[in-house]
Structures are given as C-alpha cells and as structure tokens.
Image: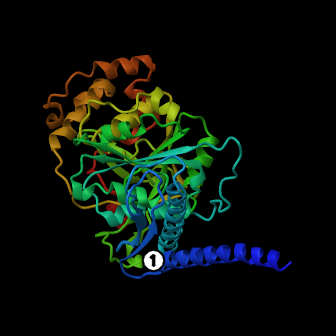
Amino acid sequence: MLLAKSLSFSYVRPIMLIALLACALCCEVTEAVTASTSKTIVRSHKHEGKAQSGPAQATPSTVQVHSDGAVRLHSWRPGVKVAGDPQDAYASRASSFQQALDTRSRDARISSFQQPPDYRPEQCSRQGLPHTHKTPTVTIVVPYLMEEWHRMSNFVTSLEQVTDMSIVDEVRFVDDGNPEEHRFKDQLMGLSPKVVVIRNKERSGLIRSKVIGAKGAKSDILIFLEPHCVFGAGWLDAILDRMTSTPKSTVVVPALDLINEPYTSNMSWKDLYGQAGPNIGTFDLPTMVFKWSDLRRHNASYQDGDPFATPAMPGGIFAIWRSFWQHTGEYDSKMTEWGGEHIEMSVRLWTCGGRIEIVPCSRVFHWFRKSRPYVFHGEANDRNSKRAALVWFDSYISEVSPRVMSVDAGDVSERVALRKELACKPFQWYIDNVCPELLDDMSRPVSLVELNAA
C-alpha cells in the first residue's frame, strides 16, 4: 500500500508542477494584455527536436502590446521542422494564446468606441432582422487612397460594434496603389478576421477599384462603402430587410448622416456627428454634377421612415444584389479615377429595369471632406461624364456643357452594345417618369452639408 501511495504521489507531483507552470504562463499573457504602455515579455522553452545535434537551444516567444492597443504573440524556432516534433504542440499553444489576445484586444477596442446617435425615425424597427435560411450573405467593398489610420480603424470598429458579422463574409479593402505609410495592410487585417486587403500595384482609380474589389465575391449582396464612414445601429438589418422584400433589381442606399469637419482623432464625440434630413439625389444636366434636394420639395406627403425612390445616388455607398450588379454591367471599366460613374449608373439602373431607393432606417455617417488628400485630375471627370452622356442621353446630349463635350471620351461602343442588350428605355422616359425636374431645375449643385445647414 505504501508503494502504491508513493507511486501515486510520484505521478501527481509532476502534474501539479505542470499546472502551476501553465498558470504562470497565463498570468504573463494577462499582464501583457492589461499593460497600459507598450512592452515586451520574453520567455524561453527548451528545444526538444530530435533532428538537432549539439546543446539544446532556446525557443523564445514574445508577447507585444503595441502603442495602438494591438497585441501580438511572436514566436520563432531554430532548426529543421520534424514530423511529430514537440514544437507542434508549442505552436498550437502559441496560436491559441494569440487568438485569445486578439479577441481581448478587439473586444476592448469595440467596447470603448463611442457609438453615434441613433437618428432612425421612430417608425423604424429596433428588433433586428430575423435570421432564416434565406438570410443573404454580404461582401463589403471599400477602396481607399491616402486615408488616415484613425478613420479606417473607426470604420472597422464601428462596423463590428453594430453589425451581425456572421452574415458578412468579407470586408474587402482595396488599396489603390497607396505609398507604404498609407497601406495599413497588417493593421487592417489585425482589426477583424473578416478583413481582406487587395492591393493595386498602381493607382487604378475609385471606379476600377470597386470592380476589382467585387471580383470573385461569392456573397449574395455587395455593399460598396467609403473608408471615412461609421455606422448607425441596425444599418445592415434595414438594408437587408428592404432588399429581401423587394425585387432583386432594387438598389438600396442608406440615409447618409454627417461626420463633421475636421474629423480628427481628438474631436469630441458630441461635436463629431450631425443629422441630415430626408433628401433625394439628382444631378445638374449641363455639368453632370450630382446634387442633393429636399425630399419634401418633391413629395409633400412623405411619411417619416418610409423608403423612397431617388433619381440618382452618390456613387460611393450603395447595396446591390451581386447577380444584378453583374447583369447590368458593373461599371464602365474605361472610366478613370472617379466622377460621372454614379450618374451613368443611376440612369442605367432606372432605364434598364432597376430602381434606386434610400432607406431612412439605415443610417451611415459619412465625412464629406473639404479637400482631397490625393491628386485628382479634372479632365478624368469630364471624360467619364462625356462617356456617360454619349451612351445614355440620346438627343439631350446637346444640353451637356461644351467643356465636358470637348474632351476625348474614347470608344464607347461596348457600353452602347450593353444598353441594346439590356433593352433599356430612352432617356426621355427617365425624365418623364423618374426625374421630371431635371430640365426645370438648373440651379447650382448643392452638397448635403450645405443642405443640412440651410
């Protein structure tokens, strides 16, 4: 019996020691996560690889808490990897620790983000979208060029705070040829496991970057967004609710509220956000510049909270069924940089069997910046606008400004063929049925910021 007790104790003691060591290791990781300043903790483990000769080598690992709050467990092992090597178990433990650190860091970042005000009308449901086997999946596409990190971090943090990420397959950021200091690939991918970064080696422009970002997506719905946005509660639920209750030819735009200038990282939250009223999008025919107009000026009987049709949409932010995106020709790939594509797409969607609606129960806050952080060539906008006019405006092309019509637009035969293939209605139909004020309202284009301040 004494021998049995002795043997039993001899087995228990090593197990107790192992448990104590594991506890100590967990404490070290916890201390690293809760550290308020950046520091590094280094540990060493005996290397037990059988293929090694000479003295055993240390296998160091480091837990790093970076100044931006990101936590990383870094490890490396010398020597040749051998099947069944005990290092495999170490690698598994390291991966588990890293996942725990990432989760804790992400949860802390999300919980500390100040959610914007809830500007949804009272009529909007706060219950969320009931999930069924028919709930569509979503891929989000976000091109970016010369953006500041704090705005992109806010984008992802806000998205995760108010979005059911189980129905989001991917968040595809498209790096449009950014210099090294504005790429942020590792930082973005460290924010969420849903983030994918696609890099254009050279600047391709906003229009082409959207097409590149959507290519190969398998989700039911594509949502195009801009990196200087944050999200209101229930924004995605309201979009999907509308898209699943209307024909798949309906393109949905969230109501755009305001992120106020100058949108710096140290702005007070109470000064950061502003509410915009219900507005529709139109455009100035001669210049082909998008503008906003007060909805009630066009529809005095409008009831708050109801989705409403809009003749045109701002190009950067909308949701569309992937099948309809592909069927209607995506974007004109011969357009460059940006400008004109949202007018072209608005007319194309309406005249080729589609419909564009703004959903007030979905609120996205957008920063309408006063200046661009990159070089923009005005002739690219004129060229894009002329391409749209040549294909879609029929006899009304004579109303387009001489400046736009004086540039070389290139070959548009491919888009003309698309219009014929889709059996699209004439531009006169668009004026008569969608935007009758287009010819009457030749006033200066108005921005959403100006309209909100009026």
**As drawn, 442 above or below 447:** above
Q: Position of residue 354 (x, y in %)?
A: 50, 32
Count of numbered labels shown in the rendering? 1
Q: Judge by depth and name the residue closer to the eye, 105 or 420.
A: 105
**In the image, 443: left or right of 316?**
left
Q: Secondary structure at mark 1?
A: helix
Compared to residue 286, the image places residue 187 above or below, namely below
Q: Is residue 396 visible?
A: yes
Residue pictured at 55% horizontal, 79% vertical: 24
- Name the residue at 54% across, 68% down: 118
- Most extreme residue toward the bottom is 36
Q: Amino acid at mark 1?
A: Ala
Using the image as rendered, state which of residue 150 and residue 406 is in the foreground.
Answer: 150
Crowding near the residue tagged with mark 1, few <14, some 14–19, many ≥20 C-alpha atoms within 10 Å:
many
Residue that numbered label 1 is attached to: 32
Give the x, y percent position of residue 424: 44, 23
Frontmost residue, 94 versus 44: 44
User: x%, y% of residue 4?
Assistant: 82, 74
**Is residue 147 positioned above or below 426 on the image?**
below
Would you say residue 454 is visible in this rendering?
no
The residue lying toward the viewer, choosing from 443 and 283, is 283
Q: Quadrant of the C terminus?
A: bottom left
